[in-house]
Amino acid sequence: MWEASAPSNIALIKYMGKSAEGKNVGVNPSLSLTLPHLRSQVLIQEHAQSDDTWEALDGKMTLSETGKEKFLKHFSFLKEKFGLTNKKFIIRSKNDFPSDCGIASSASSFAALTTCAAQAFGDITGQKISLEEQALLSRYGSGSSCRSFSEGFVEWDGNNSITPLPSTHADLFHQVYIVSSSVKTVSSSQAHQRVATSSLMPGRTERVQLRMNAVKNILKAQKLDWENLYSLVWAEFWDMHALFETSQPPFGYFLPNSLKLIQQARDLWETDGDGPIVTMDAGPNVHFLWRKDQLVSANFFANRNSDIRCFSNMEMP
Ligand code: 2P0
């Protein structure tokens, strides 16, 4: 039996839109921060049945039929890479955070599946593959998962280059507020396709490239330009959500509490000249990043919103 776990990540520069060649090649580069406190775990065991099967590791987690199919398809792809199509396995998985909570778990779960399969198949065949190769293979299962193979900030060019970015600024508090845990009416995979119809798609790559260069410069500088980082990450998540709302037909994820949280952060910036980095994925939940010296503000913010479920790497009230 083989076991592995992998972290999730939150994109500051978003992977949104795939190139026509398929294989989860992003139309633009992206940049994320790894979230070691939000993890998926996978167990793999050979079995005598005629097919690979999936079941929940804790007996509780549910996966939609499409989700299960996508997971098992990636597993088959990995077996093929190692020449192991004749063997059948049972795969058990779970997220360390509740699976019903609306935090996209595809990054951590596909990274954990690829890591675990690489260990298992490496032991069976003697073919050991590097972390870089594992990240590349994971991308075929789910694009964002390729950024979960290193700590800290990670840049993905959208294709075959995944680069950890050395930075002294990655030690941050993270909070994600679960505004809704309902299944999204437009999945991330559908969003990737639908944004191709947006009138704002022309020029998107150029806008991302400018923000990417600016964010990378901030992350590598000795002194952290937090305010500019906030502005760039703010512009980027609104840019992505504007793509959604200008697609044909338009779609969107904002709920009243998403706006309430965002507004509170904006108020903090306006009154104090300081506040958290704010971002959202393709969903209504809101992510905040705080510097370690903002502990008091971060706690105050959490207390004020204690009616909304929150996951964090800080002790929550
Ligand atoms: C990201 N998202 O960069 C962006 C921002 C959501 C919003 O990557 O189809 O689940 O599996 O390659 O990785 C979510 O898309 O898409 C995502 P697939 P994935 O994190």
Image (cartoon, rainbow, N blue to C red):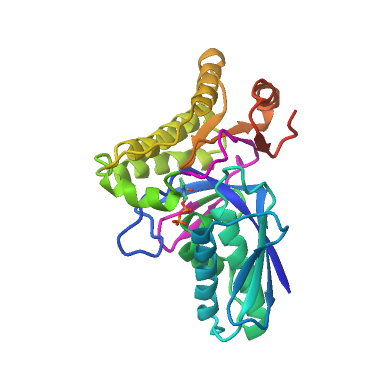
**Snapshot quadrant of residue 47:** bottom right
Q: Residue 45: horizontal and vertical position, in percent?
A: 69, 75
State the residue in front, 185 or 285.
185
The rendered magenta stretch, by its main secondary structure, is classed as loop
Residue found 50% across the figure and 70% down from its top: 73
- Res. 149 visible in picture: no
Q: Residue 291: horizontal and vertical position, in percent?
A: 63, 32
80 in the magenta segment:
no
- Res. 124 visible in picture: yes
182 in the magenta segment:
yes
Q: Residue 123: horizontal and vertical position, in percent?
A: 68, 80
State the residue in front, 128 or 59.
59
Quadrant of the image containing the C terminus: top right
Q: Is residue 212 above or below residue 233?
A: below
State the residue in front, 46 or 212.
46
Q: Residue furthest top?
A: 271
First to last magenta residue range: 155-184
Q: Is residue 108 above or below residue 77?
A: above
Q: Is residue 48 above or below residue 301?
A: below
Quadrant of the image containing the N terminus: bottom right
Q: Residue 180: horizontal and vertical position, in percent?
A: 56, 36
How many labels were placed on the picture? 0
263 on left or right of 92:
left
State the residue in front, 255 or 7.
255
Residue found 71% across the figure and 58% down from its top: 59
Residue found 56% across the figure and 68% down from its top: 134
**Snapshot quadrant of residue 86:** bottom right
199 on left or right of 242:
left
243 on left or right of 46:
left
